[in-house]
Amino acid sequence: MSEKTLKALRRMALPVLGAASFLLLWDLVVRLFHVPDYLIPAPQAVYEELVSFPVWYAQQSLYTAAVALAGFVGAAVFGFLFAVIITESPLLDRIFFPLFIALNSVPKVAIAPLFLIWFGTGAIPKVAIAFLIAVFAVVIDSALGLRSVHPDVLDLAKALRGSRLKVLLRVKLFAALPSIFAGLKVAMSLALVGAIVGEFVSSQSGLGQVILGAQGTFDTARVFAALAILAVMGVALIGVVDIAEHLAMPWRHSTVRRTRPRKAEVAEAEAWQAAALARGK
Amino acid sequence: MLALPFISARQVAKRFGGKAGVLALDGVNLDIHPGEFVSLLGPSGCGKSTFLRCLAGLETPSGGTLTVGGAAVTAPPAQLGIALQRDALLEWLDVLDNVLLPADFGGQVQDHHVTRAIELLRMVGLADFLHAYPRALSGGMRQRVAICRALLLDPPLLLMDEPFGALDALTRDQLNVDLHRLWLRRRMTVVFVTHSISEALFLSTRVVVFTPRPGRPVDDLLPEFPEHRRLALRETPEFGGYVQRLRGQFEAMGLIHE
């Protein structure tokens, strides 16, 4: 095995080690202190609950994941566009940003029942709550990133008479990417929280509804099973954002850009070689 | 000289921060002719960079008149080449795209821009780094890329604000040689801000000494050196004489004591 694969394996193994020691500790505490099942079930019991109804759990998980993702995508798109608007126009910033802060200060859990009235009991009110909870992080972090361009670079862009759109697309957007992705990661986990909050208020499906239903019958193993799925789902969703971040910013981890050379580039290289040959003779 | 000056400053003043603010420039009178390589030499805070930024249209003078190519500077002049102390390369673009930025910002990148960019990079020894990201380059290589970017559109006017200030002495010497060679080929007008006496003398056809608080030119020197200059020029008695004269200026300003 090469050193690189060994390194990669070790990097993968460490989080697994962390999770395993957590499960072991949990099991130990339950056994040592004889914690009753209805308070904290042993990991074994949670596992058995999960494998007894795999299809049902998969359906509930997919529902919740879809709601969270829809809210997240909405928050990412709207949040970024809003950040562009307030960073490009000080006037619109003065008008809308305080309003945005004020609206965000209203507890989303308190708005949830209202959404029920407006949008009914389907998936839409849950998506709306996931969106509302997630959007704040995207706006704040994107705006921070868009304002983080070094003044020298802005001076250069101005001296080169770059249009506003080009400065935004070529300079500000890229300079903002690290902040944008930081915001997206926070938004991703918040969207999941929002989806569960939405399902708590009223739902026929989803992990939030599973938790609520199981709590009514003191089926603690089922509550834990749903929580375990949520934990794994959170890690997976953040992992997807991590991968997107890696792909979006190749210049942070490679030294050379992978690209097909332009036609003019090839022509120049050929001309140079021909000239070098001619000089040689 | 009979020809009309390319850059003309008359009583240019710049005050920062309102009426009670700092007077960075006052009473700057300076004519620069096409093809001159003019160094603005002076200590930090003497307003030479501020004057350069006024020329670039990045600052507006608070008094006097400033014209480039006969027109008052109200915005960055068209076809301006500019290089700043920090190289200001875009980390997300490779070397070639960084050099092509002026063409991209000016409209669209065309084949002849690409050819010209590679030609420039070849001249400064970076032809093998076309698709390297800036983070893979040393400080000297980065600044070379920045200079190629400034020269891409063959600007009639090149403004440089201490472009080699952050480099080590050896790299700086090499870039002085590179810049001198590039200038000999095209003979564009250059305004070069520096606080290094020998750098100013080696590169320039004319050295203008600035005094601080408020910034204004106090000496104007036309060193008589051969056109093609080599680094060894700096060890000649003639060069030493000019250095002495300029150092005398700084001693008179109270900036150097012995």
Image (cartoon, helix red, strand yellow):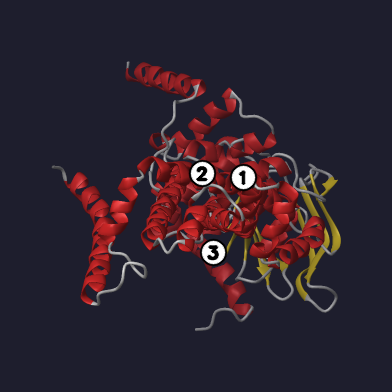
Q: Residue at x 71, y 53 (%)?
A: A115
Taking the image as drawn, is residue A117 in sight? yes
| The N terminus of chain A - image quarter | top left
Answer few, some or many: residues within 10 Å of disc 2's Cα (few below 14, many 20 plus, some between 14 and 19): some
Chain of the residue on which disc 3 is drawn: B
User: Which of the two discs, 1 and 2, labels the residue nearer the N terminus?
Assistant: 2
| The C terminus of chain A - image quarter | top left
For label 3, the residue is B197
Q: Residue at x 56, y 65 (%)?
A: B195
For label 1, the residue is A123
Q: Residue at x 20, y 44 (%)?
A: A5
Picture quadrant where residue B156 is located: top right
Taking the image as drawn, is residue B229 in sight? no
Q: What SS does tag 2 mark?
A: helix
Is the Cβ of the residue at disc 2 closer than 8 Å to that at disc 3? no
Residues at marks 1 and 2, CA–CA distance in whole angstroms: 9 Å
Is the Cβ of the residue at disc 1 closer than 8 Å to that at disc 2? yes
Q: Is residue A75 above or below residue B79?
A: below
Chain of the residue on which disc 2 is drawn: A
Looking at the rendered structure, whether the residues under marks 2 and 3 are on a common chain is answered as no
Residues at marks 3 and 1, CA–CA distance in whole angstroms: 72 Å
Residues at marks 2 and 3, CA–CA distance in whole angstroms: 72 Å
Q: What SS does tag 3 mark?
A: helix
Res A63 label = 2
Answer few, some or many: residues within 10 Å of disc 3's Cα (few below 14, many 20 plus, some between 14 and 19): some
As shown in the figure, which amino acid type bears the numbered disc 3? Ile
As shown in the figure, which amino acid type bears the numbered disc 1? Ala
